[in-house]
Image (spheres, coloured by chain):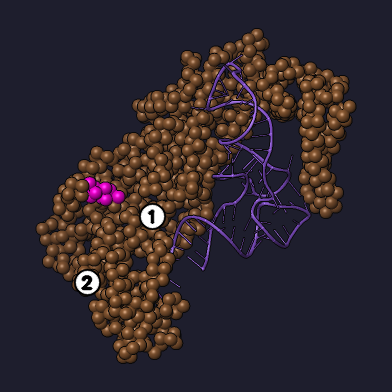
Chain colours: A brown, B purple
Amino acid sequence: MADTPSKAYAPADVERKWRRRWLDAQNFRADPASPREPYSIVIPPPNVTGVLHLGHVLNNTIQDVLARRARMRGCEVLWLPGTDHAGIATQNVVERELRREGLTRQAIGRGAFVRRVEAWREKHGGIIIEQLQRLGCSCDWSRERYTQDPPYVADVLGVFVELYRQGLIYRGVRMVNWCPQTQTALSDEEVVMKTTRGTLYFMRYEVIDSPGRFVEIATTRPETLMGDTAVAVHPADPRYRDLIGKSVRRPFPEASIPVIGDAHIDPEFGTGVLKVTPAHDRADFEIGQRHGLPIRDILNPDGTLNDLAGPDFSGLDRSAAREKAAEKLEAMGLLVRREPYENEVGHSERAGVPVEPRLSLQWFLRYPAVDAAANAVASGHIRFRPERWTKTYAHWMENIQDWCISRQLWWGHRIPVWYPRDRFQDIQSGALSDEELRSLVHVGLAPPSDPENWIQDEDVLDTWFSSWLWPFATMEEPVRERFYPTTDLVTAPDILFFWVARMIMAGLAFTGQIPFRNVFFTGLIRDSKGRKLSKSLGNSPDCLDLLDRYGADGVRFGLLRIAPTGSDIRYDEDRLREGRNFATKLWNAVRFRLLQGEASSSGSPCLSIHAIEVLARLEEMEQAVTQAYAEYRFNEITGLLYEFFWGHYCDWFLESIKENLQTGADPARRAAALQTMDRILLRFLIQLHPVMPHITEELWEILGFGGEFLMQEQLPAGSPLDGLDPAIVADSRIRAQAVQDAVRKARNMKATYGLGANRNVGFVLRPAAPCADWVQDEIPVLRLLAGAAQIETDAAYRQPRGVPGALTELGEIFMPLEGLVDIAAEKERIARELAQVDQELSRVESRLGNPSFVDRAPAEVIEENRRRQDDFIQKRRQLLEMLDILEG
RNA sequence: GCGCGAUUAGCUCAGCGGUAGAGCACUUGCUUCACACGCAAGGGGUCGCUGGUUCAAACCCAGCAUCGCGCACCA
């Protein structure tokens, strides 16, 4: 064995070293020719220009844990990494950079802009990949994919062409969510509702035929009144019924607009009168369609008002126009009042500004394979964990709406549609029918052969239109044959609709197969106050700094340990500290082993009861860990590992064998102790490796457990208890636990009398009858663990007055410190214990005295209660006896 | 408005019918020859509220309250 390492675990060098070695040995490469059972995950591709945040850390740690465990289970693992071109996000970043140079994308032109984005990506892209490697991710980096790789692009465009041919993709003028900031259409999923404090304006329009009669209208958006082409009331509303068919005066630009009756109007809301602006509100648009109202679009794409709004407003931003419109109404005596008002306003997820419902010419997709996709999850063919997300998914699938897939951006997959130059005007007017349009356009992977006569569609596809193909478009044969469908997908629930649902539909539509079998949804990481982590709030920690300070293994362990299944995660740096501390604990436990030198293989490995106990705990832990993996309960996995190693191996086993390691100890016992340590460390490192890969790999090497890499080891086939007689195991465990109980009680007694640190205390043990014949063997361990100078066993010991004692599973233990003990305090302590026993006893007795309990409870429960009753009676008698003696 | 989830020790959470748990924090004592990123001992909870089911309820059921998250065109 190598030199003893230093007592502080320094992760930086160790992690760097193993990252390098794993990569050099190509340990992460998936071999499609391998006969092993395949296991695969595709990474949720981060933005190519992104940087690591805690969500990535959690998400990818979980994937790495799954991948490494799968390798140890004997699987051939493909964890496929890659990045996403992230249309809007990336374009925004580059545009911002251009603005700093006093340029715009329009100024430099499309070709130059796209080259610029690519250059930017060359420079800054891939940082996140390095950061994932830094975390220890065991992805097959040789198969890294990017949504702008030429073959991937071909798949994306091919899917567009195919869906177009099937008639599922169509172009049309529809109400879409328009982001005036980025000046592109958005899908419904990219709109987030935000509670917004605003004002409800009450204004009045004069009825044209009845001068002096006004209708009062409540609106949150007076700035759109210039686009009003009607006023609507509920057809049955007695207040206004007579007005239907008449007209009112729109104050500016002044016009006569009709009053119409429509059942959509809620008479209870506001005044029961709605101003109808078909160009700027989804519901109003529909009302307009029903009544053949004209559409008056008063907004420019950037959110400023246009000439139709009148000279006062033209060029003004929509937010400035709101107050100005209200002032103007006020000046005209048409504003009745303002009321503070709170409502939900759709905001652009990316840009953060309110979206504008806007009529525009866009491409839409009628989703394919909707029923099959809904059914795949409902039937359990694809399993969601936590399961409750299946309901959310089902609900969305039932109410699925066509997807607006075109974006008015330059960065992305350009729509593979060309329009004949001579009909371009007609086409862009949006006036052509679907059949007419189809008869004119060229749709295909390649441009038309006479490109000079054609104009390509300017738009690109929504980024998710490429992401939804990720599980299979990243794989070519023979990899796809072997590793698709993938096994597990790990992602956050906030992209269930954006990504997961769409991948299921794409998988079924284009491969005829589900894309993955299990989806594990992580919790969303929040700060300690429950807020989402975000750059703008400044509550998002610098992950590289965390990796520096706590080590990749510490961060991984700490995060997993607090990742409950199915709810959000309150992030607290203390948790990472626990992870780091655990790594150090492990490090030092191994150092302790190394300080003992070689384990001589001679001598019969006669295991102590403490060794058997810890081996049994190890077996329990291994089984529980296997179960926890099957249920994707990652916090439980780390909890089990922590508890076993710290609580059982270090706190009890290592302490118990120190007696065997002292100089002059029996060499056979010493050898047995060392062998047991090695046996446990070996199996423990295998169990811990997926969670803490670097330190375990390092320790595996230092301990000389063989093989080139721990990560290539397989889970041990047998149990740690194999070869041991179950009866002996059971008996040993009872003994070991009795010793532990006695140790705890003895320590407690010492602490109670302020002797916690005193190692010169002597105890007397009056052994319980079943322990009498073996307890002598355990006295040295007992003495060591309790920190006693000597422990005398005396079955006939008569407790003198003033000597404190305690009941233990080993018997009664006394601490003869005559004169030193505060008798009153000791009486109080025993009285407290007695009170507790009394309480328990009366509870058990009242239960057993209840005829309906005895009648109806299962026999084993009754039996258990009888046993406890006996126990308590016995304890009570002993405690009373102690009190008696104290009183003299 | 509809749906989902949460409510257990100061904090973060586990437990989901039969003796209330963990980690951190807290208190006390420890330079014990692996570890102070440590060791030992200890204090701390009428398990949100009200009913119901049951021999037995943190746990199952119903209702309520509070918080969070989705979904929804109430201007």
**Residue drawn at the location 41% of the way across and 44% of the way down:** A539
Find residue B55 and report its image quarter. bottom right
> Is residue A333 depicted above or below A1 in this figure?
below
Query: Residue beneath label 1, please?
Result: A498
The crowding category of the residue bearing disc 2, from other C-alpha atoms within 10 Å (few below 14, some 14 to 19, many at least 20), is some
**Residue drawn at the location 51% of the way across and 37% of the way down:** A575
- Counting from the top left corner in percent of width and height, residue A676 is at 61, 21
A97 horizontally vs A193: left or right: left
Label 1 is placed on what type of residue? Answer: Phe
Q: Is residue A473 visible?
A: yes
Q: Earlier in the sequence, mark 2 or mark 1?
A: 2
Depth order, front residue of A800/A502: A800
Q: Is label 2 on the same chain as label 1?
A: yes
Q: Main secondary structure of the magenta part?
A: helix
In the image, residue A96 lies in the stretch drawn in magenta: yes
The crowding category of the residue bearing disc 1, from other C-alpha atoms within 10 Å (few below 14, some 14 to 19, many at least 20), is some
**Residue drawn at the location 34% of the way across and 77% of the way down:** A335
Depth order, front residue of A427/A352: A352
A302 horizontally vs A502: left or right: left
Quarter of the figure that contains the C terminus of chain A: top right
**Residue drawn at the location 41% of the way across and 71% of the way down:** A339
A431 horizontally vs A665: left or right: left
